Image (cartoon, rainbow, N blue to C red):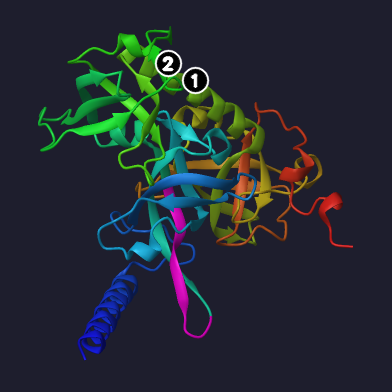
Amino acid sequence: MVALSSFVILLSSLAVTVAAEADKQSASYQLQPGQFPPDGSAHDVAGELIQMDHVNRTGQLRPDRRDDQRTDDYDRALLFTMLPYGTLRYHGAPAELRDIPIGTHLHGQFYFEAKTGKPVKGGFGMAFLLEDYFSFQQRQQRIWRLDAVNLDKGNITVTGLSLVDNKPDAKPTVFKVNAATRVWKDRGFGALTNLTVGQTILLNITVATLKGPGRCTDIWLDDESRQLASAHQTEVHRAYEKAHGLPAWIDTVDHEKSLATVTLFGGFDPALTNDFKLKSRVAALVAEDSLRSYDQSNDRMHCEVLEIRNVPIVPGSSGLQLVIKPENLLEGFRPRRILRLLAASWPLDDLPWEEMLWPADNRVK
């Protein structure tokens, strides 16, 4: 009877957990087609990047273990798809999935994606934001204070500090370090022996989901090294965007006047918009939700920029809207469809075959 009673209690507990999770999912904000989500509506998930398809902007995270999880659910991979207006940040700068090494611990913001079936199943698989620890701490206006260095045991003790009020965390955190940990000092490499109690540092970590707080892959000792890391990643980002185009979606199409109003997505380096000027020509590429386009050289459509507007900045939006006049309205020029826009001064080169939609080599025979 005792065993049966324990089993009933266990089933009741599981039912409550499942019901609570269902309530949480049903109460979560549901993404609406053609609309940016409201501020604060995303679901926070942190974990380790364990797989990626950088071309299609999909991947897998191994989520951090949480107290509200069943132990059987520990370390189950979370499959995610980047939203068209979803962004990534690495080293405090805009990034693409390809820029982030496998194993990097990331902080993310996700939306619920319902799956059809009986019963209906789904998960928080639509990624709005993914960022490394470096970027997360910067956005939160936080930094780590180095409290102790124990290289013999391979660990460091740090306390998180708010840069707003210098308030420390209630408890310190112990991270692992080893010979593979990269230390960045001034404009070059440092060494673990350069770690000094009292320093304020930023870091990136790995194996956080399996081994507690995690192991440091990189440690930045000073402002100069951090600024250099961000500046380099910014240039990587700029080069990618100039080759592929800034993503946007079409708000409205005026067929009589052959005009399209488009809103550029957020998350890119704002300096790139300096190349978009009134009366200039831009190349528009029809793209899918993955932001993949077709043959850039043959499928682009030149457009004249007639208006540049500032609209309210909301999550996912840059706050920049363009009214463009294409030479011809292509089939893909429809409201809610995605475009990539290249300024006239940017190169319009062929993309690698694997980055194009439906390349001949990948067609089903």
Tell me which corner region of the image, top left, top right, bottom left or bottom right, holds residue 275: top right
Residue assigned mark 2:
228
Q: Position of residue 359 (x, y in %)?
A: 81, 50
| Residue at image location 31% in from the left, 72% down from the top | 21
Residue at which label 1 appears: 232
Q: Is residue 299 left or right of residue 269?
A: right
Q: Quadrant of the C terminus?
A: bottom right
- Residue 116 place in picture, x, y as percent: 53, 78
As drawn, the residue found furthest toward the right would be 365
- Residue 48 image label: none
Q: Is residue 121 magenta?
A: yes
At 29% from the left edge and 78% from the top edge, which residue is drawn? 14
Q: Residues within 10 Å of mark 1 (few under 14, many from 20)?
A: few
Which amino acid type is marked by label 2?
Leu
- Under tag 1, what secondary structure? helix
Question: What is the crowding at mark 2: few (fewer than 14 residues within 10 Å), some, or many (at least 20)?
Answer: some
